[in-house]
Image (cartoon, coloured by chain):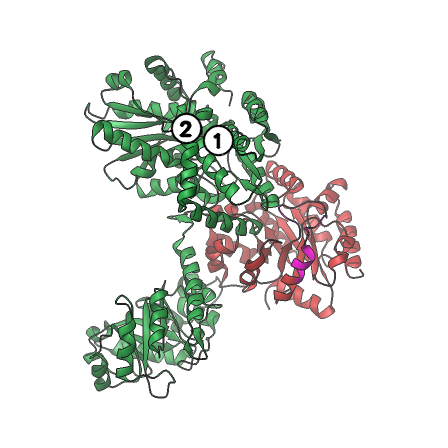
Chain colours: A red, B green
Amino acid sequence: MSNRIEARMAALKEKNEKAFITYITAGLPDMKATKEIIKAQNGITDVIELGIPFSDPIADGPVIQQASYEAILNGASLRKTFDLMEEIRAEGIEQPILFMMYYNTVVNYGIEAFVKKCNETGVDGLIIPDLPFEEQENLKKALDNDDRTILIQLVSPVSADRISKILADAKGFVYCVSAMGVTGQSATFHKEVMNYLADVKAKSAIPVMMGFGIRTAADVAPMKDIIDGAIVGSHFINLMRENDFKAEAATEYATTFKKELNEI
Amino acid sequence: MKIKICGLTRPEEANYINENKVDYAGFVFYKPSKRNLTLEQAKEIMNHLNEDVKKVAVMVSPDAEMVEAIQSLPFDILQIHKELSEEVLKVAALPVWYAVNISDEAEAIAKKAIIDKLPADLADKIEAIVVDAPNFGSGQTFNWHKSRRMLKAGAQSPPGVEEDTEDVTLTSFFEEKKFVLAGGLNADNVKEGIRIFSPDIVDVSSGVEGEQGKDKEKITAFVNAVRQIGENMNKRAYYGEYGGQYVSESLMNTLDEIDAAFEEAIKDPEFIKQYHYYLKQYVGRETPLYFAERISEKYGTKIYLKREDLNHTGAHKINNVIGQILLAKRMGKTKVIAETGAGQHGVATATGAALFNMECTVYMGKEDVERQALNVMRMEMLGAKVVAVESGSNTLKDATNEAIRTWAKTAEDTFYIIGSAIGPYPYPKMVKEFQAVISREAKVQHMEVEGRLPDVVMACVGGGSNSIGMFADFIDEEGVELIGVEAAGKGVDTDEHAASMAKGRPGVLHGTRSYLLQDEDGNIQLAHSISAGLDYPGVGPEHAYLHDTGRAKYVPITDTEAMDALMELTQMEGIIPAIESAHAMAYAFKKAKEMTPDQSMIVCLSGRGDKDVNTISNYLAGKGYLN
């Protein structure tokens, strides 16, 4: 198995542990800080999502919108994030890392060139919230030849009959949007969220992760028997801001969350 | 994507083929097969098949005598498995499909060697390669991913992976012929097979069988699965390479529902009657096609103005709002949301919401809220809630982002009324449908006066709603020149314009792929125009398509040119146009100089200028831009 995310998922399954995933906007407040935040979670957080800032983040709530906006003003870009990936991998950090980004950033870079660069710089996976299953053809064609970079599939509480076809060739893990709409909403989950998660879990051959609106391990206690892990985005950014982006805060939060996640 | 159903054994199965408009039907002549037929049995089934279904005779290592016997029946294609001899090819009077078991590399290479040795005239008789499972008719799939690498490795080999030279030979071998994907397909796996191989034809047999031979429902399910992906590949949601549905997963079922409801509604005479009732009694249609006498005389050609400015609420926007809000009601939605830049679409939506007693929220960039205070007031009087959006640039594109976000959260009871010819499919199609009334009327009106079609039809283009409505009924009239006028702001060579067609690149924004103003990182740039309605960094996908195919021409007009035209129209015809529409007027004056007095053009006067009086007075006072 040559994909870091898939390898990590397999290892967690072996140990019967749940996965902990964090999201941070690349270049907030600068690439140096981002690098330190990644390194601070090495060996703790199972997968790190790096958000590539985009001018029009339609799937994100206010926290990530603002983060994205500031990162762009500070000069962050896809190209610079690739540079960061090269540095991180050169330092021997084997942490699974994926990009969460908008499709125009891929199109602008050129789909083939983008995939090649992801393969080369050790980007293990992609989450593209404005690229639903029906529009994935071109990207999948480019990704098909090499499993170093995989496309993560998203499902939502209203995906209903779409779930089976989305899961048919899903790789790595499934990203379950737990609340409707955009990132960073409070942890008031969609009314039938438990049924939905159970449905996805029953249909999925790969681990099921829940994201959107999670702050602490206790937030996912009600569905601990269903899900295989939790993703924290907006709250993690808020936390980093409150701590002046100090790497130690990331270490501490990740350690606690990961520990509690496997104790609940 | 063509479909072949193979191994028919009963006459009634022919009906399933006919009903599902399957392209090819296969008849097996191979004694060990449970689907084996005699010539008489085959003839009986063929009699039930529609003429346009191609009949394929499937044989295993046949001799020349057998092929000649087969050709006594009205077959269209010979499909041959295992051995294919020169003698057989010599007597073959029909195109030959040659089956290859691709999971066995040695066999595939051996078969290629056989073809290579054939004289060219015989090799040419092989029209297609049927890529089959190891055991003919076994219903097993072969290893798709491995096979794909073998078949299609060439161009897409990842860096660092050494190519097997044999693979490359195979690639060229298969690319010369049509590619038929067979072997264990069914309704569940066919989409994946199509995605991996992009075949020309998919061939199914056991995957659509029940206990008694071919199963009607399974055939329908298989055909639907193929057509669905076929539509995606043919890009039903696309205009050429533009359009699509680039939204979050949580909106995909919503778009499907809207699409289904919309297609049903526009075929329902009651719905259409209702729509036209409100257009006539409430909006005040039809609008006049006014012959602008003085400017026609001055510029030396006949200039007709399609008076959308005379609609209720002062612009064409209401046509679309009435259509979409009736659809929203029909779908049982109780709330509507909309985005607005200058406030025209917001006012139109608030108006429709008041009329149909629906809760309405309008998203508007904070900057626009401040500079369009009057329209904000109008919306609030009409009972709408106006949300000032503070994110990004605080303008129309950010208001649109926020409307999409809200919609993703609330789609269960909320309908998003998009005002421009943008957004995910089916929005561009809906907006065109509900604005097409502009050109339908204009065409008839022009015919009544001139007895012929106009030479030129012109409209301004921001997102492109009035222009797509003005073009709609003329797109198929080849003799009519279509011109869209973009806002060039301070000039297309400055950084301050809204000319996405002239200066943009294809990209993805607000659910659709089209021309966009963007920087080198793919971030969307701010558009600039004195006209708020044209101040958008993208353009509707159908316009991008009309642009690329050359059917329509898109030209830029600067702020200054537009304002000069605005004043001229005001003073010569007594019509104060919206600044948006003044862009079209400005190019009309330029274009007229190339035309003769006998020729005529229609300019869409999309809105009236009352809303712009503040901007105009500031401009005239030399204060420059409000926007």
Q: Is residue A97 visible?
A: yes
Residue B497 visible in the current orientation: no
Residue A189: say if magenta: yes
Chain under disc 1: B
Residue A61 left/right relative to B280: right
Question: Does the segment drawn in magenta span residue B490?
Answer: no
Crowding at dot 1, Cα within 10 Å, few <14 / some 14-19 / many 20+, comes out as many
The part of the chain drawn in magenta is: A179-198
Mark 2 and mark 1 lie on one chain; the one further toward the N terminus is 2
Kindly identify which numbered label has been placed on residue B487.
2
Q: Quadrant of residue B514?
A: top left
What is the residue that sits farthest to the bottom in this orientation? B32
Closest to the observer: B578 or A43? B578
Q: Could you tell me which secondary element the residue under label 2 belongs to?
A: strand
Q: Chain of mark 2?
A: B
* Magenta stretch, overall SS: loop
Residue placed farthest to the top in the image?
Answer: B621
Dot 2 and dot 1 residues touching (CB under 8 Å): yes
Q: Quadrant of the N terminus of chain B?
A: bottom left
Q: Report the side of A85 relative to A108 (left or right).
A: right
